[in-house]
Image (cartoon, rainbow, N blue to C red):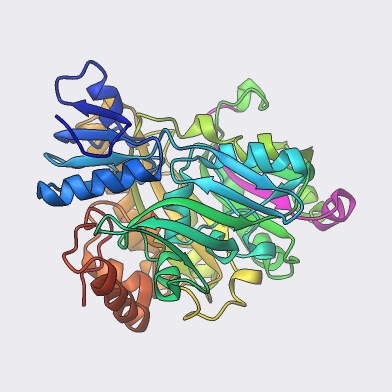
Amino acid sequence: MEMNGFRGQLIATDHADYDNHRAVWNGAVDRRPKLIARCGGTADVAAAVRFARDEDLEIAVRGGGHNVAGTAVCDDGIVIDLSAMRAVWVDPARRTAVVQGGALWGDVDHETQAHGLATTGGIVGHTGVAGLTLGGGIGFLMRKHGLTIDNLLAAEVVTAAGDIVRASAHEHPDLFWALRGGGGNFGVVTSFRFALHDIGPTVMAGPVFWSAENTTDVLRFYRDFAAEAPDELGSVVRFGTVPPLPVIPEHLHWRPAIAIACCYAGGVEHGERTVRALRRFRSPLVDLLAPTPYEPFQCGLDDTVLHGWHYYWKSAFLDGLSDDLIDAIADRAYTARSPRSYAAMFHMGGAVARVPCDATAFAGRAVAHNIIIDAVWLPEQSGERGDAETAWARDFQRAIQPHCTTGVYVNFLDSDDDSSRVLEAYGDRNYRRLAEVKAKYDPDNAFHHNKNIPPG
């Protein structure tokens, strides 16, 4: 098969590595495209888009391949695969980085930390830059430096027509607005330009674990602790079991526990004072909150969410932590059958909340927390175990739903979340504006293998 203007690698169904290249992070996703176009650069992406349009092929776009719904791969169509495009160029003088569309957050942190710089990225190193950014981008630095999209300065985009355009505040500003939260609806982003900030290389960071029996008391303490926290302190609460990591004593592995992980985006001494009360609360099972290099901290969870495991997610926004919500979380969080299943709650606010809700497509600016319920099981446990974990996630969400606020983070939507939840992610006003931008740049909805916003 030939593709005019394409210099990358074409992988058809009879290729020896076909199964490896069609696999994505979520092993529960099993789709068989006709063709995988592994692009070497922007020109290859443009050629692949034009080919797909000419041949009337279903299009999926792969960056990191980390979306839980498996939108990076499709049946019977073409996967435009950017996974070989992982370069990161740092300009320390201007404090910016240009990142190719197939890069992972571990790639970005590795290059930027060589200069003592970073930007808000995901909390797992093998998460793709493109998918996380286009949905909004939450992470430990967001309370101090905003979402990933708040640090996006420009993007190079291949449109549905196969044209290459640059989107920024001054060029195609309507497209730039939509890219900041609207997902992969508007084109293939081949590179991002980010603002960077002084971070590390050593930060006060890490988790503190308490026994699951203490969940109610820990959350009530955390409610006040988080409310008074400075913007520099990012925190994530995890409900599940203690992961079997080498830095954790073996006798604690797989024990049900609540953990609060923190990262202080400032001086270590100030960070130590800020988290002192947290570390002294009750009697932790283990305290790993200490001065640590930022880059390895950012990838510390990588082995707890491995490629090929099976995943199913539910998610919601929270206005706050009422006693009733805390009780509902404590009642449901540890009832999964799989020791790998967990829930995680991200502390929002700070710089995130100071950006107007209509300044970007991301609408969840005013919420206090974002919770994700992550059912996880091994490939050999598919069937009854997978059904049980999926039911646990759904039941957990139903139990907390009366205490949730309107909205959802689009990056946390799974494959069975219908179009009503996509609308919920943006709200009526932002959704209508996104549909108008979609009609301009992709009027035929060629890019619909995503959390889709039809042209309007």
Task: Give the percent coordinates (x, y) of residue 392.
Answer: 32, 47
Q: Residue at x 64, y 41 (%)?
A: 109
- Is any part of residue 233 visible from this angle? yes
Task: Give the percent coordinates (x, y) of residue 440.
Answer: 27, 73
Q: Which residues are magenta?
A: 253-274
User: Which quadrant holds residue 294?
Assistant: top right
Instruction: Look at the image and tell me in which quarter the C terminus lies.
Output: bottom left
Compared to residue 215, the image places residue 165 above or below, namely: below
User: Which quadrant holds residue 350?
Assistant: bottom right
Q: Residue at x 60, y 62 (%)?
A: 151
Q: Residue at x 79, y 54 (%)?
A: 275
Q: Residue at x 68, y 70 (%)?
A: 227
| Residue lying farthest to the right in this orientation | 269
| Residue lying farthest to the top in this orientation | 16
User: Which quadrant holds residue 15?
Assistant: top left
Task: Give the percent coordinates (x, y) of residue 310.
Answer: 32, 34
Q: Is residue 155 left or right of residue 30?
A: right
- Is any part of residue 380 visible from this angle? no
| Residue lying farthest to the front in this orientation | 5
Compared to residue 410, the image places residue 361 above or below, namely: below
Foreground of the two, 155 or 149: 155
Task: Give the percent coordinates (x, y) of residue 174.
Answer: 40, 75
Instruction: Look at the image and tell me in which quarter the N terminus lies.
Output: top left
Magenta stretch: includes residue 219? no
Foreground of the two, 153 or 454: 153
Q: Is residue 374 left or right of residue 321?
A: left
Q: Is residue 48 left or right of residue 154?
A: left
